[in-house]
């Protein structure tokens, strides 16, 4: 039987995933089988299998647990200890598989459950609200080899935590309403409405959605494509998870609207691997829309309007949120960002004009078309019309999703979510800005503090250097390795931070880390490397005491303690006399 028939779709990533499910890893035999079926060089299939964190070339345990190492879901305070405890309890080391292949454990980058307490993925399924008790029970269930479907259901229940609905979250709309309006006014008028609304992309960069659609529509090509970026990998961000769970119909409507404007017949949702649990739900909505004539051939009876959507699930690579890397992944390649220009609007998927938009942007577009551009511009600021949906987590009483008109102050958000005694706020995840109290009066908007969707709150008791270290680990792990400034820069920054944290750094090290940070940001190929040092540079600028407090007075100290490093050698040679020690 061809492999594709057994998987949910014939996309390379899905086929590899299916084979991995069957054999606990992607074996050489699977690689050969896939290469033959897809008529691809074996080297390309290996490159894909080795690029993505959720693909394994050696067997994982039948229970495979990955703890989210995000600061906001409590990894530093809780998750790390729980990981160690589970490892000891089950006799397995993090990153390895137990000899009997029953269990393997490890860490993974933020899984988008920051409002749910400490969390992990077990065989790809998010398990939340972790504490010592739950971990002990999990250890017993694993030991008894109890299938996961018999584990307590509440461990897998993901609450939405929508605390403050606004323009978008209060309006779910009826399926097809926005499309009917579009068919009535035509593609030109629809595009005009999006342009007049001033809608800007909600995925981070804030590019005008109307312009993007116009550029793509005007670009010559055999086909045009629409892609919804549901990769949401920025630590601390989970608003797209909530939108996908509750507002997917509006998102598909926005994609279909975009297809109508740019003349696309095919669209993709690129869903992050961590949200695979949402796939069945999304497929159900797609099926319903096909049955209602809102997708497929002759949508709503319009002769030339044909469009359908495929969902492709990623496999654990933050870089695939970058639009050109995402397109590479869709094309069945490792997610390495392309050289831009050309931009996707002229040469995107398969070299054809492509719109890539964030989940929230597409939902906003569907509503704007239905309610009119004035409905949108009436709130927000001059350059940031409408609302912004925020994922709020960390040290506050009510973590969750909040929607505000652009122009809201950071302080107001902190008050609303019950954050007191706040030391710092990381806006837009590790690649964004780390702000202190002096900046809390500033406004969330493209003209002041722009925000892709998350606020991580750190109270006075948090160790900001530990937070920096966590972010530095994240970037080192997620760098795709394509360009030297990012591949090497992120590693050097991580090493330097360790030196500071270990109390071995001098003022010269601080100057060097700043220099390194600027080089990494300036010379990296894509947005990941260009923002990878932000958190350190902002810490230095806004919290100089944090660094100064850890420095030694020496003019130079090596990266590590040379004398301590010789301890093993001393033990082996049974020597501990003065001559066996380095003099300071
Ligand atoms: C490293 C990196 C990760 C990104 N991750 C996401 C993401 O998860 N979701 C998203 O919509 N945009 C992400 N972006 C931005 C996308 O490249 C792109 O600008 C966006 O999807 C465009 O949609 P918009 O115009 O609706 O914002 C990321 C960019 C970079 C550099
Ligand atoms: S900046 Fe980093 S993530 Fe981007 S291409 Fe270079 S190595 Fe890859």
Image (cartoon, rainbow, N blue to C red):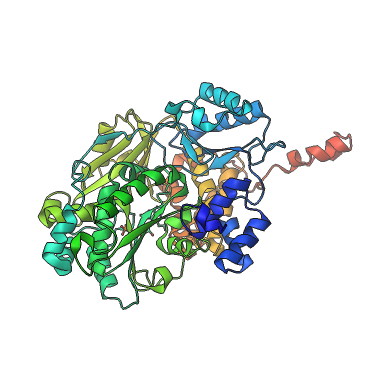
Give residue 568's quadrant in the image.
top right
Q: Quadrant of ligand 1?
A: bottom left
Does 114 sit left or right of 515 as displayed? left
User: Which residue is pictured at 62% across the width and 42% down the height?
Assistant: 504
Does 65 sit left or right of 559 as displayed? left
Give residue 276's quadrant in the image.
top left
Query: Is residue 267 shown above or below 18?
Result: below
User: Which residue is pictured at 42% across the width and 42% down the height?
Assistant: 112
Does 390 sit left or right of 2 as displayed? left
Whether residue 443 can be seen here: no
Which quarter of the rendering shows the C terminus? Answer: top right
User: Which residue is pictured at 60% across the width and 64% down the height?
Assistant: 35
Q: Which residue is outermost to the front?
A: 1
Image x and y of residue 544, in percent: 44, 43
Image x and y of residue 2, in percent: 56, 59
The foreground one among 184 and 530 is 184
Q: Which residue is outermost to the bottom?
A: 220
Whether residue 544 can be seen here: yes
The foreground one among 498 and 527 is 527
Image x and y of residue 257, in percent: 23, 60
Which quarter of the rendering shows the N terminus? Answer: bottom right
Image x and y of residue 129, in percent: 45, 28
The foreground one among 206 and 458 is 206
Q: Which residue is outermost to the top?
A: 133
Query: Is residue 15 shown above or below 238?
Result: below
User: Which residue is pictured at 43% across the width and 45% down the height?
Assistant: 275
């Amino acid at each position: 039987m061809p492999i594709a028939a057994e998987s949910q779709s014939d996309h390379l990533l899905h086929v590899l995933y299916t084979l991995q499910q069957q054999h606990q890893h992607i074996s050489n035999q699977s690689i050969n089988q896939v290469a033959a079926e897809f008529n691809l060089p074996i080297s390309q299939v290996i490159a894909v299998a080795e690029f993505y964190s959720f693909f394994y070339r050696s067997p994982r345990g039948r229970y495979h647990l990955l703890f989210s190492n995000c600061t906001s879901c409590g990894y530093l305070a809780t998750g790390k200890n729980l990981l160690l405890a589970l490892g000891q309890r089950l006799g397995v080391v993090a990153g390895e598989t137990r000899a009997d292949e029953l269990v393997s454990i490890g860490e993974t980058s933020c899984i988008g459950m920051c409002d749910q307490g400490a969390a992990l993925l077990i065989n790809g399924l998010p398990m939340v609200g972790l504490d010592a008790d739950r971990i002990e029970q999990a250890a017993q269930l694993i030991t008894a080899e109890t299938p996961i479907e018999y584990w307590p259901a509440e461990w897998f229940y993901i609450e939405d935590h929508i605390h403050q609905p606004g323009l978008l979250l209060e309006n779910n709309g009826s399926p097809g309403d926005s499309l009917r309006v579009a068919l009535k006014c035509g593609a030109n008028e629809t595009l005009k409405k999006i342009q007049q609304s001033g809608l800007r992309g909600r995925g981070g960069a804030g590019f005008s959605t109307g312009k993007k659609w116009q550029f793509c529509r005007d670009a010559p090509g055999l086909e045009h494509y629409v892609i919804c970026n549901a990769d949401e990998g920025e630590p601390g961000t989970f608003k797209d998870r909530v939108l996908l769970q509750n507002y997917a119909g509006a998102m598909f409507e926005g994609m279909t609207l975009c297809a109508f404007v740019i003349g696309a017949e095919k669209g993709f949702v690129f869903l992050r691997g961590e949200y695979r649990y949402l796939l069945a739900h999304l497929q159900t909505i797609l099926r319903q829309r096909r049955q209602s004539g809102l997708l497929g051939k002759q949508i709503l009876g319009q002769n030339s309007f044909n469009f359908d959507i495929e969902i492709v699930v990623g496999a654990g690579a933050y870089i695939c949120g970058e639009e050109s890397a995402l397109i590479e992944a869709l094309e069945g390649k490792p997610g390495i960002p392309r050289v831009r220009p050309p931009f996707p609007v002229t040469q995107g998927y398969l070299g054809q004009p492509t719109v890539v938009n964030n989940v929230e942007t597409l939902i906003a577009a569907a509503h704007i078309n239905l309610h009119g551009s004035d409905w949108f511009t009436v709130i927000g600021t001059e350059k940031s019309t409408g609302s912004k949906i925020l994922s709020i987590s960390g040290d506050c009483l009510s973590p969750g999703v909040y929607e505000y008109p652009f122009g809201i102050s950071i302080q107001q958000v902190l008050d609303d979510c019950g954050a007191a005694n706040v030391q710092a706020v990381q806006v837009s995840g590790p690649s964004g800005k780390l702000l202190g109290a002096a900046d809390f009066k500033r406004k969330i908007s493209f003209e002041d503090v722009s925000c892709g969707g998350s606020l991580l709150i750190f109270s006075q008791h948090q160790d900001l250097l530990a937070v920096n270290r966590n972010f530095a680990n994240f970037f080192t792990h997620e760098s795709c390795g394509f360009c030297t400034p990012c591949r090497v820069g992120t590693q050097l920054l991580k090493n330097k931070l360790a030196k500071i944290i270990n109390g071995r750094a001098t003022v010269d090290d601080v100057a060097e880390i700043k220099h390194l940070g600027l080089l990494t940001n300036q010379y990296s190929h894509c947005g990941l490397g260009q923002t990878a040092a932000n958190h350190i540079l902002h810490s230095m600028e806004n919290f100089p005491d944090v660094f100064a407090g850890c420095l030694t007075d020496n003019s130079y100290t090596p990266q590590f303690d040379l004398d301590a490093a010789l301890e093993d050698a001393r033990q082996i040679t049974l020597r501990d006399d003065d001559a066996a020690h380095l003099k300071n």
